Image: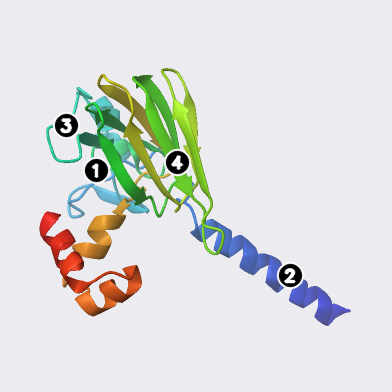
Amino acid sequence: MKAVHLVLIIGLLAMASSGALAFDPSPLQDFCVAINETKTGGVFVNGKFCKDPKLVSANDFFYGGLKQGDTSGSLGSAVTPVAVNEIPGLNTMGISLARVDFAPKGLNPPHTHPRGTEILVVLEGTLLVGFVTSNPENRLFTKVLYKGDVFVFPIGLIHFQLNVGKTNAVAIAGLSSQNPGVITIANAVFKSNPPISDEILSKAFQVDKSIVDAIQKGL
């Protein structure tokens, strides 16, 4: 029985450890304002080097002017992140946000956040949103959102937003990580550095190599 209990305890500890590693660490003090220069005032470590609390000011928790992004690009959308790099005081807090602006027909293309779940609220306009589940189902969940509507994209799953209205659209996204990261699928696959070979991409997508080359040039 002791051996069984030992195996059970080890298993539970392993599960707890894997769960803890999957998300941002919990704060070990009131705050841990991130700093890049570790030689001056870097006295605490919790995810990043932290500023001495005696040197912290209100500005470390502030971001001014979350303004409209430039949507004149080919996709017609712009994402303005407000994460730990923009607000050092977010370090260890496990949250961040982004403003997403859309021109009419603008697209925030299929992408993932490897370290955060996203909750999106529409401030203006009409958005078609969706996400795809993992293999083998690859099930697509879609919904048209209007002003005031809220939608959740589970952590790590491919998702998108498309402005299906005739006017500009604006949304705010909250994310469950101080630095959720973003992987834009098209860029990751067709614009990697160094590039993935045409042979691999043409076989993976079941298209001619000339089409792969055209996509890479277009991006």
Left or right of 29: which side holds 162? left
Q: Which residue is mark 4?
A: 130
Quarter occupied by the C terminus: bottom left
- Kindly identify the amino acid type of the residue bearing the numbered disc 2: Ile
Q: x%, y% of residue 189?
A: 27, 64
Query: Circles 3 and 2: CB distance less than 8 Å?
Result: no
Where disc 4 sits, the SS reads strand
Q: Residue at x 31, y 56 (%)?
A: 185
Query: Circles 1 and 4: CB distance less than 8 Å?
Result: no
Q: Is residue 199 above or below residue 182?
A: below
Q: Which residue is mark 3?
A: 71
Q: Residue at x 34, y 27 (%)?
A: 171
- Gap in angstroms between the C-alphas marked 2 and 4: 40 Å
Q: Is residue 76 above or below residue 11?
A: above
Where disc 1 sits, the SS reads loop
Q: x%, y% of residue 129?
A: 42, 36
Q: Which residue is mark 1?
A: 85
Q: Residues within 10 Å of mark 1 (few under 14, many from 20)?
A: some
Q: x%, y% of residue 210?
A: 16, 69
Q: Is residue 161 above or below residue 169?
A: below
